[in-house]
Amino acid sequence: MRHKVTLIPGEGIGPEVAAAVKRILEATGVQIDWEELEARTDKATEAGQLVNQAAVESVRRNHVALKGPMGTAIAGGAPSVNVALRKTLDLYANLRPVKNLPGVKSRFEGVDIVLVRENTEDLYSGLEHEVVPGVVESLKIITERASTRIAKFAFEYARANGRKKIHAIHKANIMKLTDGMFLEVFQDIAKE
């Protein structure tokens, strides 16, 4: 059986990383037809994003993609293509497994954690503006819908993978409305 996969090689070391992963996948014998596209375009969309809409449509059509690292300017420059792809494709759940590697010395032993991060809201909304010269503001957006969705995802992932504990990381002691709502939603989902 052949699989159609979108390949977004990325920038900087991205193409080299993508090429190495392609070789690894080829060695498995899995038959993949790669649809290779760049994620960045020179023409901004209506939302001001520099995302290649053909790449977005390819991911939607193929339902799977391999994306290499993308460059994101620090403290200036164009909006992040990574963030634009997450928002456009609604890639809300970011899974980050953390485990000790056999034979590699570490300060802590027996580490086996999976971080589940909501990837489309909070400060990832990317809503910033200059209030007055020398004063900038970043808006932290939290919705009940996204909080519910990520909490359900975390619990379903834990159940499906034999995990026994879930911790909700928040700052509700200071951000009483945004993180407060996130925590309340998480606690409600936990009861279910």
Image (cartoon, rainbow, N blue to C red):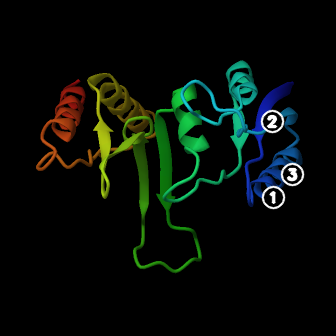
Residue appearing at x 21%, y 40% in the figure:
179
Residue that mark 1 sits on: 16
Q: Residue furthest top?
A: 61
Crowd tier of the residue under label 1, counting other residues whose Cα lies within 10 Å: few below 14, some 14–19, many 20 or above:
some
- Secondary structure beneath dot 1 equals helix
Of discs 1 and 2, which sits in the foreground? 2
Of discs 3 and 1, which sits in the foreground? 1
**x then y, percent, for residue 23:** 86, 51
Residue that mark 3 sits on: 23
Residue that mark 2 sits on: 37
- Secondary structure beneath dot 2 equals loop
Out of 34 and 44, give the one closest to the viewer: 44
Out of 22 and 70, give the one closest to the viewer: 70
Task: Please say if the residues under marks 3 and 1 sit with CB atoms less than 8 Å apart.
Answer: no
User: Quick check: 42 above or below 74?
Assistant: above
Specify the amino acid type for callout 2: Leu
Q: CA distance from mark 3 to mark 1?
A: 11 Å
| Disc nearer the start of the sequence (3/1) | 1
Specify the amino acid type for callout 1: Glu
Specify the amino acid type for callout 3: Arg
**x then y, percent, for residue 174:** 13, 50
Residue appearing at x 23%, y 35% in the figure:
182
Q: Is residue 97 left or right of residue 122?
A: right
Q: Is residue 44 left or right of residue 161?
A: right
